[in-house]
Image: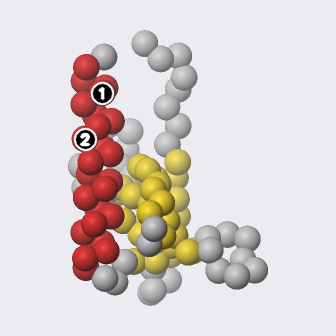
Amino acid sequence: MCDEEYAPDIISVIDEDGKEHIFEELDRIETDKGRYVALSDLPESPDDEMSDEFIVLKVVQEDGEEEATLYPIEDEAEYEEVGNLFLERFAELYSDEEEE
C-alpha cells in the first residue's frame, strides 16, 4: 500500500471563446514532432468516477515566453499517432497496477 496521498495535476485551459476548462493532466510525452499532454475532464465531485476519455494537446514554448501554450493538433495523422502512444502508455501503466 502506498503512503503518499494522491494529488492530481490540475490544468486550466482557456478556449478560443475565452471559456475556462479544468482538466487533470494524465501524462506528457515528447516525440520527434513535439511535446504533448494528455488531459482528462476533472470529475465534478470526489465521488464521481474518472472518465476513460482524454484529449491530446500540443505543448508549444513560444520564444521569450516563460510558460508553454497548449494547442489542439490540427493534423489528423499526427493526432492519431500521438493518441496511440498515450493509449499504449496507459495500457502498460494499468496492466502493471493490476498485477500488483
Front in this rendered view, residue 52 or 22? 52
Residue extending farthest to the bottom is 17
Classify 64 as above or below 79.
Answer: below
How busy is the neighbourhood of tag 1: few (under 14 within 10 Å), some, or many (20 plus)?
Answer: few
Q: What element carries label 2?
A: helix
Classify 54 as above or below 58.
Answer: above
The part of the image, by quadrant, that contains residue 55 is bottom left
Residue ID at (53%, 16%):
3
x and y percentages locating residue 53 in the rendered image: 25, 55
Circle 1 residue = 96
Residue ID at (24%, 69%):
80
Q: Is residue 60 visible?
A: yes
Circle 2 residue = 91
x and y percentages locating residue 56 in the rendered image: 36, 65
The part of the image, by quadrant, that contains residue 65 is bottom right
Front in this rendered view, residue 2 or 12? 2
Identified by mark 2, the residue type is Ala
Q: Can residue 23 be seen in this view?
A: no
x and y percentages locating residue 88 in the rendered image: 27, 48
Which one is earlier in the sequence, the residue at label 2 or at label 1? 2
Residue ID at (53%, 37%):
7
Identified by mark 1, the residue type is Asp
x and y percentages locating residue 71 in the rendered image: 46, 77
Horizontal relation, residue 62 to residue 81: left or right:
right
Residue extending farthest to the front is 32
Q: Is mark 1 on a helix, strand or loop?
A: helix
Quick one: quadrant of the C terminus? top left
